Amino acid sequence: MLIHTIKEVREQVKEWKKLGLTVGLVPTMGALHNGHLSLIKKAVEKCDRVVVSVFVNPIQFCPGEDLEKYPRTLEADTKLCDDAGVNIVFAPSPAEMYGENQMRTNDFLTYVIPPFFYVNKLCGKSRVGHFDGVCTVVNKLFNIVQPDFTFFGEKDAQQLIIIQKMVKDLNIPVEIIPCPIVREESGLALSSRNKYLSDEDKIHALALSKILNNIKNCYKKGITDVEALKETAYQFLDEHHDLEYLEFMNQNDLEETTKADDTTRVFIACKVGGVRLIDNILLGEK
Ligand code: PAF
């Protein structure tokens, strides 16, 4: 069922709660791919009822980013959700979420601001304000849907860690279920922005997963010095790659590390053919 208003979602969820049913929420910006479908599948397995939100959230885009051209494929998304057993696709307009006036002067909106320590690094460094927009909309979605469980992909690991922190700090009564990265057979992590890549870009984009897998192999062989592990990346990079960062951080609190261990997550962001791609790997994972 496709719903566009907060009021209708609330009414429906209220009915489910009266019957004692558990509710799962999968927040998305649409352009659904197999990565999203893996979250949706998990939600359908775990919860009695599932809501998928499809909302290209304007306040998490920075000036000059791809808000206008971000792929919008609501019809196809709704069909995929229906086939997967989703009960509600919630696709509000920006005005429904933020009000007409607040869309024009969104400085006046009440924001949820995650701690500087979590956002002044990785994607937050170049995307100033991005995680304020993410936390604000996710908090709103939690308040609207009041889910028992919510599902986030490890592909956006910094986002996942920040949302875990928000839920803990604000005592939000929802359990977050982290879901592993889904990759193409080639190793490329699935992302809605892969749509912007040409066939040739896609080949160059494999550098990200190759760098991460190689670092993990070196770590498994006993190299723990982060500088030495970083050095191993350069063999995979050439003029087709614009590396933004390659960072090693504790996967629970994003503390930077100089000596890798099993709790270290390696994060990479790199532009290929003008498209900004991110990926990550947990060194301790089997
Ligand atoms: O990961 C995304 O698609 C978005 O950041 C999210 C969590 C749906 C918030 O808009």
Image (spheres, rainbow, N blue to C red):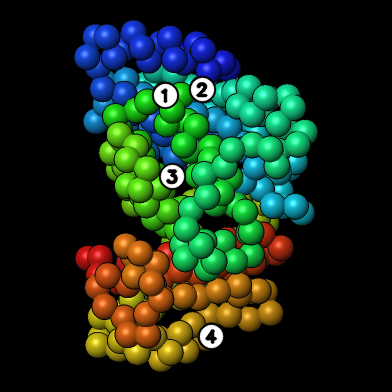
According to the picture, the residue beneath numbered tag 4 turns out to be 234
Q: Label 1, label 4: how many angstroms apart (C-alpha)?
A: 45 Å
Name above or below for residue 226 compared with residue 279: below
Disc 4 is placed on an element classified as helix
Closest to the camera, between mark 1 and mark 2, is 1
**Picture disc at residue 21:** none
Name above or below for residue 137 compared with residue 184: above
Depth order, front residue of 172/248:
172
Q: Quadrant of residue 275?
A: bottom right
According to the picture, the residue beneath numbered tag 1 turns out to be 145
Tell whether 17 sits left or right of 40: left
According to the picture, the residue beneath numbered tag 2 turns out to be 90
Disc 2 is placed on an element classified as strand
Disc 4 residue crowd, few under 14, some 14–19, many 20+, Cα 10 Å:
few
Depth order, front residue of 153/236:
153
Disc 1 is placed on an element classified as helix
Q: Residue at x 59, y 66 (%)?
A: 125
Q: Quadrant of residue 45?
A: top left
